[in-house]
Image: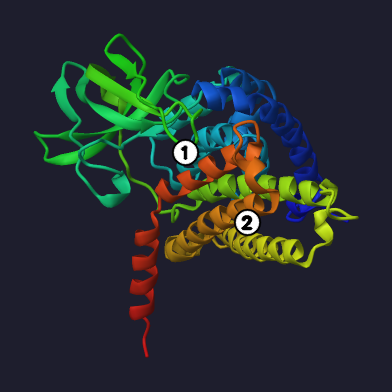
Amino acid sequence: MIRLIDSPIRNDVERNRAALVEQLAVRFAERAPRYDREGSFPFDNFADLRKEGYLKLTVPRAFGGDEISLYEFVLLQERLAYGDGSTALAVGWHLGQIMHLRTTGKWPAETFEALCRSVVKDGTMINTFASEAASGSPSRGGRPETIAVAADGGWRITGRKTFSTLSPILDRFVVSAYLPDEDCTADFLVYQSDRVSIVETWDTLGMRATGSHDVVLDGAFAGADSRLTGKGTDDGGGWLLHIPACYMGIAIAARDYALAFARSYKPNSLDKPIAALPTVQQTIGEMEVELRTARTLLYAAADRWDKEPTERTAMKPELGLAKYTVTNNAIRVVDLAMRIVGATSLARANPLERYYRDVRAGLHNPPMDSSVIQMLAAQALGEET
């Protein structure tokens, strides 16, 4: 019988990539408890990802990458998160940014090509740092307090960014900044320098190993060619499905742990494992409903995004619904798994305890639940009757 996690695989190419990622996931699962306990960054995991070519999966083939589809991106991220949610979420931002730039053409062609070739050759990674304490998530529309001031040959940028995932390992990143002289906001490509520092603020309940510290820019220089236009096509934000894919992977890991426990645990009050109990079977069935419903939405959205590029902008409500459903259902699945396993699931040594903390982080990744609900309501009210 095909395992649940294997069910979306469509061909041998996807099967072979999934098998490679599964090997990584097994290795990462062994390391995850230590990184979670320490709240430290998993440099070993990223060395493995670089070695196996994972970092170039979404890079265009023209520049030496694999140019995978969104569907396969979701498939692989889900499997990686099965081993370690923090590593999967963190690397997902890098892969997703590359996919987003590939499909929108937001960056100047020469700048994007240079980045891609560096990813392939050197394992370079990228992320965008936009969140700030005062303005909150950029998805809410707040103006950044980070300021860019014109200087000889470029700009000097000063400000502080929060939730800067991957910050311990990046040598370059994108920051959003307000330009007072032009009364507008722009993105800038900034390289690590003595004008950039990391304040290790990331000490959270879950996703403790993403390295999402504060990044402080004190007059960091961005050259004239480092201001990014922000123009290009609207891809609907399909690349953000890497987020629900991560939480779905965690939920499947919790489900599989609970199934293995139910099949093997036989208290002395029973003559067979607890999997034979109707109440346990009911809970397992409830997990399956939550998982299969959410995964159907997730993979259908990714597949449609791949096949209908002209509809991507209009797909924002559908993509948001996939994230909303997966995230909330994943939380429910982990809760049900812990009910099956019982009080031992609360122990620090039990992976369910980490899954429980990690999966809740999805509520605070974009798009937020309230935004998705408002978007769906607006679409419904806009229908002609």
Q: Which residue is mark 2?
A: 336
Place of residue 222 in the rendered image (x, y in percent of width and height, measured from the top left) = 27, 21
Query: Spatial distance from mark 1 to mark 2, Cα to Cα?
Result: 34 Å
Q: Does 350 appear above or below 304?
A: above
Q: Position of residue 125 (x, y in %)?
A: 50, 26
Quadrant for the N terminus in the image: bottom right
Could you say whether the residue bearing mark 1 is in a helix, strand or loop?
A: helix
Quarter placement of the C terminus: bottom left
Q: Is residue 173 visible?
A: yes
The answer to whether residue 103 is left or right of residue 355 is left
Residue type at mark 2 is Leu
Q: Position of residue 122 (x, y in %)?
A: 57, 17
Q: Residue at x 57, y 54 (%)?
A: 330
Sequence order check, earlier mark of 1 and 2: 1
Q: Position of residue 373 (x, y in %)?
A: 38, 66
Residue at point 67%, 20% (across, down): 51
Q: Which mark is residue 97?
A: 1
